Image (cartoon, rainbow, N blue to C red):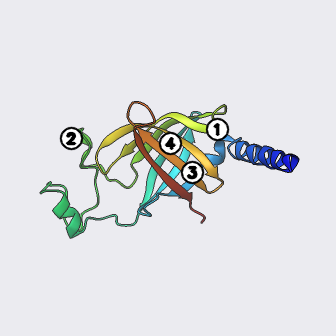
Amino acid sequence: MKTVWLTLSVLCWTAGSALAANPDDLLGKWLNEEGTAKIEIYKQDDRFYGKIIWLRDPVYAQKDVDEADGHPLVKVGATKVDYHNPDESLQSKPVLGLVILRAFAFAADDDEWSGGRIYDPKNGKDYKAYIQLLEADKLKLRGYIGFSLIGRTTYWTRVKE
C-alpha cells in the first residue's frame, strides 16, 4: 500500500511540475475570473505581457456613471477609459487594448512567471505579481503589495476559439 501511495505521489508531483515546463504555455487568450474581460498574454523580448482584448461591457452604463462620482470622462454610452489612472495624461486611454500584465519572466525553479506587475484599471493601482499555471487551461494570478502574503488571488481560464 505504501508503494502505491509513493508511486501516486511521484506521478502527481511530476505531472504538476511538467505542466509549466514550457514557458510559452502561458501564451494565449484568457478570461478573467469575473467573466468581464479577455486578456491576451503574449511574449516580447523573453518577457510576458497581457493586454485586454475584449470587454463584456465596453461602454459605460448608468450604474458606472453613478459610481464615478461625476468624473467628466464617464458618460452613458461612452467607451470605458482608464479614468482611475493616477497619471492624468493616461486617464482618457481606452481600457480595451490596455496592457495590464507587464514584464513577467519564467522561473523554472518555482514553475511560475514572476518579477512582473499587474495593473488594475478598476482602481488605478499597480501591484507586484506572479502567475502559476494550475492546469493547461487554468492559471492562478496573485497580485500583492510588498510580499505575497498581502494581496489578492484570481483564477483565469483559457479561451478556446
Q: Name the residue under label 4.
A: 49
Q: What residue type is labelled 3?
A: Leu
Of 110 and 113, the residue lying toward us: 110
- The tag earlier along the polypeptide, 1 or 3, is 1
State how far apart marks 1 and 3 are (Cα): 12 Å
Name the residue type under label 4: Tyr
Percent across and percent down for residue 6 are: 82, 44
Q: Is residue 63 left or right of residue 122?
A: left
Q: Which residue is drawn at 85% across and 46% down?
A: 2
Q: Name the residue under label 1.
A: 111
Q: Distance between the residues labelled 4 and 2?
A: 23 Å
Question: Which mark is on residue 88?
Answer: 2
Q: Which of marks 4 and 2 is nearer the N terminus?
A: 4
Q: Quadrant of residue 57?
A: bottom left
In the picture shown, does residue 39 fall above or below 152? Answer: below
Q: Mark 3 points at which residue?
A: 139
Looking at marks 3 and 2 on the same chain, the residue that comes earlier in the sequence is marked by: 2
Q: Residue 139's spot in the image, x, y percent?
A: 57, 51
Residue under the image location 53 percent in, 35 percent down: 114
